[in-house]
Amino acid sequence: MANPFRYFKTSPEVIRLAVMMYVRFPLSLRNVEDILHEVGIDVSHETVRCWWNRFGPMFASEIRRKRAQQMRSFPQWRWHLDEMFVRIRGETHYLWRAVDHEGEVLEAYVSKTRDREAAFGFCARR
Protein backbone atom coordinates (compact mmCIF):
# COMPACT_ATOMS: atom_id res chain seq x y z
CA MET A 1 0.00 0.00 0.00
CA ALA A 2 1.28 3.46 -0.88
CA ASN A 3 2.22 5.93 1.82
CA PRO A 4 -0.81 8.24 2.42
CA PHE A 5 1.52 11.05 3.61
CA ARG A 6 3.72 11.05 0.48
CA TYR A 7 2.61 14.42 -0.95
CA PHE A 8 2.75 16.34 2.33
CA LYS A 9 5.76 18.39 3.42
CA THR A 10 4.80 18.08 7.09
CA SER A 11 5.90 14.97 8.95
CA PRO A 12 3.29 12.25 9.60
CA GLU A 13 3.82 12.65 13.36
CA VAL A 14 2.72 16.29 13.26
CA ILE A 15 -0.30 15.47 11.10
CA ARG A 16 -1.30 12.65 13.44
CA LEU A 17 -0.83 14.89 16.50
CA ALA A 18 -2.98 17.70 15.05
CA VAL A 19 -5.79 15.38 13.94
CA MET A 20 -5.83 13.41 17.19
CA MET A 21 -5.86 16.62 19.27
CA TYR A 22 -8.87 17.85 17.28
CA VAL A 23 -10.71 14.55 17.55
CA ARG A 24 -9.82 13.49 21.10
CA PHE A 25 -10.27 16.78 22.95
CA PRO A 26 -13.11 19.33 22.71
CA LEU A 27 -10.98 21.81 20.78
CA SER A 28 -11.80 23.98 17.81
CA LEU A 29 -9.56 24.10 14.76
CA ARG A 30 -8.22 27.46 15.89
CA ASN A 31 -7.44 26.07 19.35
CA VAL A 32 -5.41 23.27 17.75
CA GLU A 33 -3.64 25.89 15.62
CA ASP A 34 -2.80 27.92 18.76
CA ILE A 35 -1.54 24.90 20.71
CA LEU A 36 0.67 23.79 17.84
CA HIS A 37 1.97 27.35 17.47
CA GLU A 38 2.99 27.38 21.14
CA VAL A 39 4.96 24.17 20.57
CA GLY A 40 6.69 25.76 17.56
CA ILE A 41 4.65 24.29 14.70
CA ASP A 42 3.07 26.90 12.43
CA VAL A 43 0.04 25.55 10.60
CA SER A 44 -3.25 27.14 9.66
CA HIS A 45 -6.57 25.97 11.05
CA GLU A 46 -7.61 25.29 7.45
CA THR A 47 -4.64 22.95 7.10
CA VAL A 48 -5.76 21.06 10.21
CA ARG A 49 -9.28 20.84 8.74
CA CYS A 50 -7.95 19.41 5.47
CA TRP A 51 -5.82 16.90 7.38
CA TRP A 52 -8.83 15.90 9.47
CA ASN A 53 -10.98 15.38 6.36
CA ARG A 54 -8.30 13.32 4.66
CA PHE A 55 -6.77 11.30 7.51
CA GLY A 56 -9.56 11.24 10.11
CA PRO A 57 -11.33 8.15 8.71
CA MET A 58 -8.00 6.34 8.36
CA PHE A 59 -7.05 7.05 11.99
CA ALA A 60 -10.55 6.09 13.19
CA SER A 61 -10.42 2.71 11.45
CA GLU A 62 -6.95 2.11 12.89
CA ILE A 63 -8.20 2.88 16.42
CA ARG A 64 -11.26 0.63 15.93
CA ARG A 65 -9.09 -2.23 14.70
CA LYS A 66 -6.69 -1.93 17.66
CA ARG A 67 -9.58 -1.69 20.10
CA ALA A 68 -11.24 -4.78 18.64
CA GLN A 69 -7.98 -6.72 19.01
CA GLN A 70 -7.73 -5.63 22.65
CA MET A 71 -11.33 -6.68 23.28
CA ARG A 72 -10.69 -10.11 21.82
CA SER A 73 -7.52 -10.56 23.84
CA PHE A 74 -9.27 -9.60 27.09
CA PRO A 75 -11.35 -12.68 27.97
CA GLN A 76 -13.36 -11.07 30.78
CA TRP A 77 -14.69 -8.12 28.75
CA ARG A 78 -17.97 -7.11 30.34
CA TRP A 79 -20.42 -4.27 30.37
CA HIS A 80 -23.22 -3.36 32.72
CA LEU A 81 -26.32 -1.21 32.66
CA ASP A 82 -26.06 1.98 34.70
CA GLU A 83 -28.98 4.20 35.64
CA MET A 84 -29.13 7.72 37.00
CA PHE A 85 -31.58 10.57 37.46
CA VAL A 86 -31.15 13.76 35.44
CA ARG A 87 -33.19 16.94 35.35
CA ILE A 88 -34.01 18.31 31.92
CA ARG A 89 -35.96 21.57 31.89
CA GLY A 90 -37.08 20.96 35.45
CA GLU A 91 -38.45 17.47 34.78
CA THR A 92 -36.90 14.28 36.14
CA HIS A 93 -35.72 11.90 33.45
CA TYR A 94 -33.78 8.66 33.67
CA LEU A 95 -30.44 8.23 31.95
CA TRP A 96 -29.62 4.63 31.07
CA ARG A 97 -25.99 3.97 30.13
CA ALA A 98 -24.09 0.92 28.96
CA VAL A 99 -20.67 1.06 30.65
CA ASP A 100 -17.81 -1.34 29.93
CA HIS A 101 -15.32 -2.77 32.44
CA GLU A 102 -12.97 0.20 31.92
CA GLY A 103 -15.69 2.73 32.79
CA GLU A 104 -16.16 3.97 29.24
CA VAL A 105 -19.72 4.80 28.22
CA LEU A 106 -20.71 2.66 25.24
CA GLU A 107 -24.18 4.10 24.70
CA ALA A 108 -26.66 6.33 26.51
CA TYR A 109 -30.46 6.56 26.43
CA VAL A 110 -32.80 9.04 28.15
CA SER A 111 -36.38 8.06 29.04
CA LYS A 112 -39.18 9.67 31.00
CA THR A 113 -40.18 6.43 32.68
CA ARG A 114 -38.29 4.10 34.95
CA ASP A 115 -39.86 0.74 34.28
CA ARG A 116 -39.22 -2.60 32.69
CA GLU A 117 -40.16 -1.43 29.19
CA ALA A 118 -37.63 1.43 29.31
CA ALA A 119 -34.82 -0.91 30.39
CA PHE A 120 -35.70 -3.52 27.78
CA GLY A 121 -36.06 -0.78 25.17
CA PHE A 122 -32.53 0.35 25.86
CA CYS A 123 -31.19 -3.21 25.79
CA ALA A 124 -32.99 -3.88 22.51
CA ARG A 125 -31.22 -0.89 20.95
CA ARG A 126 -27.85 -2.38 21.86
Image: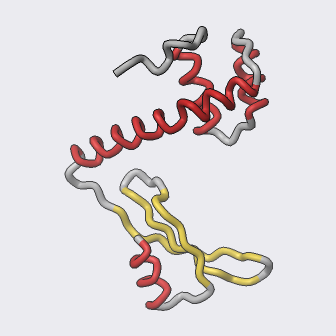
* Relative to 34, 100 lies left or right: left
Decide: is 24 above or below 32. Answer: below
Q: Position of residue 93 (x, y in %)?
A: 65, 81
User: Which picture quadrant has residue 94?
Assistant: bottom right
Q: Nearer the viewer, residue 126 or 56?
A: 56
Number of callouts in the render?
0
Q: Position of residue 109 (x, y in %)?
A: 55, 73
* Relative to 121, 46 lies left or right: right
Q: Residue at x 77, y 23 (%)?
A: 34
Is the N terminus in the top left, top right, bottom left or bottom right quadrant?
A: top left
Q: Position of residue 21 (x, y in %)?
A: 62, 31
User: Which picture quadrant has residue 33?
Assistant: top right
Q: Residue at x 74, y 12 (%)?
A: 42
Q: Residue at x 23, y 47 (%)?
A: 72
Q: Residue at x 50, y 17 (%)?
A: 5
Q: Position of residue 103 (x, y in %)?
A: 45, 54
